[in-house]
Image (tube, rainbow, N blue to C red):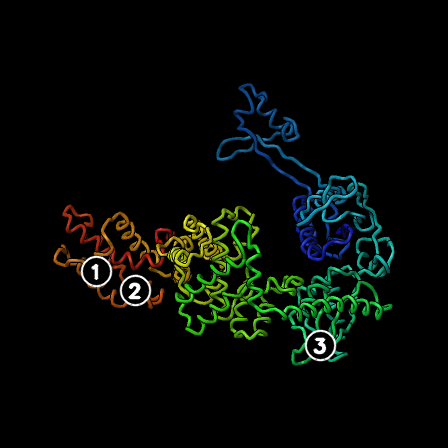
Amino acid sequence: MAKTYLLEIGLEEMPAHVVTPSVIQLKERFAKFLKEARLDFDEIKTFSTPRRLTLQVEGLADKQADVKKEVRGPAKKIAQDADGNWTKAAIGFSKGQGASTDDIVFKEIKGTPYVFVQTFTAGKSAKDVLAGVKDVITKMNFPTMMKWSTYSFKYIRPIRWLVSLLDDEIVPIEILDVQAGRTSRGHRFLGHDVEIKTASDYEADLDQVFVMADAAKRKAKIREQIAQLATEHDWKIQVNEDLLEEVTNLVEFPTAFAGDFDTKYLQIPDEVLITSMRDHQRFFYVTDSEGNLLPHFVSVRNGNADHIQNVALGNQKVLTARLEDAAFFFHEDQEHSIQEYVERLKKVSFHDKIGTMYEKMQRVMYISGFLANQFGLTETEKNQLHRAAQIYKFDLVTGMVGEFPELQGVMGDKYAVLKGENPAVGQAIREHYMPISADGALPQSKVGAVLAVADKIDSIASFFAVGLVPNGSNDPFALRRQAFGIVRIVRDQGWDFPIRQFETEIQTELQAHDATYNLDFEQQTQPVADFLTDRVKQWFSNQKIRYDIVDTVVKGQRQDIRQMFKAADVLNAHQNDPQFKDTIEALTRLLRITAKSDIALSDLTVDPALFENDAEQALYEAVEKLQKTVTPTMSMDERFKALAGLRPLIAAYFEATMVMSKDEKVRDNHLKQLLIIANMVTVMGDLNQLIVK
């Protein structure tokens, strides 16, 4: 008969961001526990609040399935001696199966009789199996863990109660000084302890003590209450999903309410108001139908509607104090010029081993200027970029960013425009931080994109230059994220980006302007190049590109990020072509032969007079024709198809030609002919890495 099992872990309030991942982890661990214990079930439901992680297992088998096994032992000739007596091998085998020699039977396998013993293991009851749940609970992992009282045991928060019920029967569990029972706890202020009669009654019983245990229902209730407020007041309320998830995990019995703030604060930039409300107070902000911010907010109380107006007034006071600070900083910051702030950066450390923020800006100014020339920016864009690079970190020393660090870049944009800078300069200042996460938004302007790349290049090169290189999972300066950002921006903009070449030329640029500030960048050229290449590989991995295709494109000679993307797209698109295998084999054969050549690439003149067969002439004419069409603007797909068209001619060439002729002139002529093709092939990467079957 199917049963229902309830497990509730009662805790001190957990941080909101760990509630959902923790209950998911608990469910996964418990499902694995039941599977390994051979205890069948239909479904595991989860419940969670800031003070509890709960599972409700429905359709749980009342016992494990019985296990019958037939185990084969040694051959009969080994199990018995000549007189038919059992040998030590037979006796040991039977004992090992929990049986005796009386239980042995013989069965033939391919004409040879073997010893067999049939075993039977009766399934344990569900209650006996569930006694092992303690390990599921205690072995959970959390981002932060703590000890309490005199115990050495660590958990996300102190465990205060446990409920463990199989239908209506308590399944004993004990963790530290807490024994499982049927008593749960209601809302901290509105509820009281409650006896859970049966496992199936859990949700209904908690409803009676002001706890909505189902997080999905709680979230839906909050969304419904916010929508009702919006309808009542004719507001547009921006329901940020991350904030909604956080608020859901902060409350057990939600009641949404509205509050107001003085209209004078609407003079402050919207970003400041929204940050104050959303990030600091966990409020939802309100706009009119045109998207204009209104002097109202919506919050969610952990409780009912009693005295809700007092709660709203209390929240208004807290928000007003924060907005008053914001207003002060906003007006105070404008009393100083941008140049004053830039001068202050000369005394602000970027890192004590690297130098000041001002020195970083100087390096980025030259790096961005170099990149602007490479990426074909207009003169207007170059001027905007130059100005942005001169000042782009100035807002770090403003009062507003000191109070609201998450607004760096945003306030730089606002203040720059207020001080008369071109809006494109302000936009670049805002965008240079992008992307702020692995899949975050990218800069929308070319000026902002170049500044973002330049800033990230400088950060990576500077930290590498002083030996602060990420290792393992340790990356305190987020260099992997910044490198991945470079890769994403370059792909998005479609820029050529030969890694090693740019690194070397950037170093030359900095040295020419005496802007290295005693940092030795040259020694880290290869490590930095490898680091960026690894981020390209990461991007491909995220796209599920075949690993051998990835190895092919990243191990090319030029190491150009854009070319890597193009080559991977082409190889991925053509990998299932009927002639793909033959094409790659033909091209890699000539690559292997030419790899050993010491002929200078500057002198690849082929002499047809030295040809010894028609296949050489046919290939020569096809390559001559191809060279006229293969240009830097030719797409990678067109290049691949053109090279694939040479496949039958290359095959015929190798069939008829002894490449490594004893005649040196003839041999060199052969190699020159193949090197011309190889140079066109290697743009796609190292095709030797491809696995074709």
Q: Amino acid at mark 3?
A: Leu
- What label sits on residue 415 in the rendered view? none
Question: How many marks on residues?
Answer: 3
User: Between disc 1 and disc 2, whose residue precedes?
Assistant: 1
Measuring from the top left, give residue 587's x and y in whole percent: 30, 55
Question: The disc labelled 1 sits on which kind of residue?
Answer: Leu
Per the image, the residue denoted by label 2 is: 642
Q: Is residue 672 above or below residue 267?
A: above
Q: Secondary structure at mark 2?
A: helix
Which comes before the other along the chain, label 1 or label 3? 3
Are the residues at dot 3 and dot 2 in contact (C-beta closer than 8 Å)?
Answer: no
What kind of residue is marked 2?
Answer: Ala
The picture quadrant where one finds residue 441 is bottom right
> Residue at 47% of width from left, 70% of height from top?
446
Instruction: Give the residue at mark 1.
Output: 619
Q: Is residue 553 visible?
A: no
Q: Which of 640/476 is in front?
A: 476
Q: CA distance from mark 3 to mark 2?
A: 61 Å
Task: Say which of marks 3 and 2 sits in front.
Answer: 3
In the image: residue 631, left or right of residue 481 = left
C-alpha separation, residue under disc 1 versus residue under disc 3: 74 Å
- Can residue 110 be seen? yes
Residue under pointer 3: 294
Which residue appears at 35% of the width and 60% of the height?
Answer: 578
State whether residue 635 is above or below residue 482: below
- Residue 178 percent across, percent down from the top left: 81, 43
CB contact under 8 Å: marks 1 and 3 = no
